[in-house]
Amino acid sequence: MSSVQETAYDPQNIFARILRGEIPAHTVYEDDHTLAFMDVMPQGEGHTLVIPKAPARGLLDAEPASLAAVAATVQRVARAVKAAFAADGLTVFQYNEPAGGQTVFHLHVHIVPRFDGVPLKRHEGGMADPEVLKDHAARIRAALGAN
Ligand code: AMP
């Protein structure tokens, strides 16, 4: 762990459990270093998360190579998400520590499609219908395949 951050990584966090296959996720993309899947409490249609496979609590303790892999996947998935939902724009964000709004302590980047005049929904506002998430994941995977 880097000296810039003092709180330890908890391997029982929910995203670590998704990475180990202990709990399911609606996956849209995976490579050797990153995983992208649907946020279960979307702040907008198509809200997707990108995480590194290497353990990191947040931005400050991640290895630069892992961050670079996440950035590349964020761009790749963001392009597909924008195409899949015919979005006018995208909001991309990342929180660090409770004071920064973080609730799951494995580094993750949010990608939310945006539409002119449509506000972002509340953070963790409610669980989405799993069938809807399944359909949205399939749309994004199809757009990734078309890229
Ligand atoms: P934050 O740590 O504040 O950036 O937010 C964590 C995000 O993870 C929230 O948007 C949650 O809706 C989302 N989330 C929590 N549990 C799961 C899960 N099991 N699968 C997918 N997304 C999740």
Image: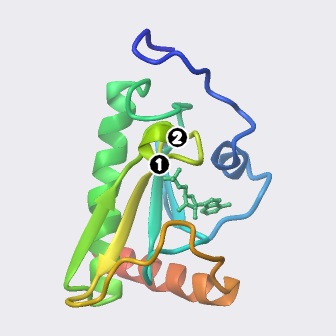
Q: Is residue 46 above or below residue 1?
A: below
The residue positioned 30% from the left and 60% from the top of the image is 92
From the top left corner, tell me how far across and down residue 55 is, in percent.
Answer: 56, 31
For label 2, the residue is 98
Q: Which mark is residue 101?
A: 1
Question: Could one spot residue 115 in this view of the protein?
Answer: yes
Ligand 1 closer than 8 Å to label 1 CB: yes
Quadrant in the picture for the C terminus: bottom left
Q: Amino acid at mark 1?
A: Gly
* Identity of the residue drawn at 19% across and 85% down: 88
Ligand 1 sits in which quadrant? bottom right
Asked if the residues shown at circle 2 and circle 1 are in contact, with their CB atoms under 8 angstroms apart, the answer is: yes
Closest to the observer, 104 or 71: 104
Q: Quadrant of residue 121?
A: bottom left
Which residue is situated farthest in the right direction here?
22
Q: Left or right: where does residue 40 sit relative to residue 138?
A: right
In the displayed structure, does residue 87 sit left or right of residue 12?
left
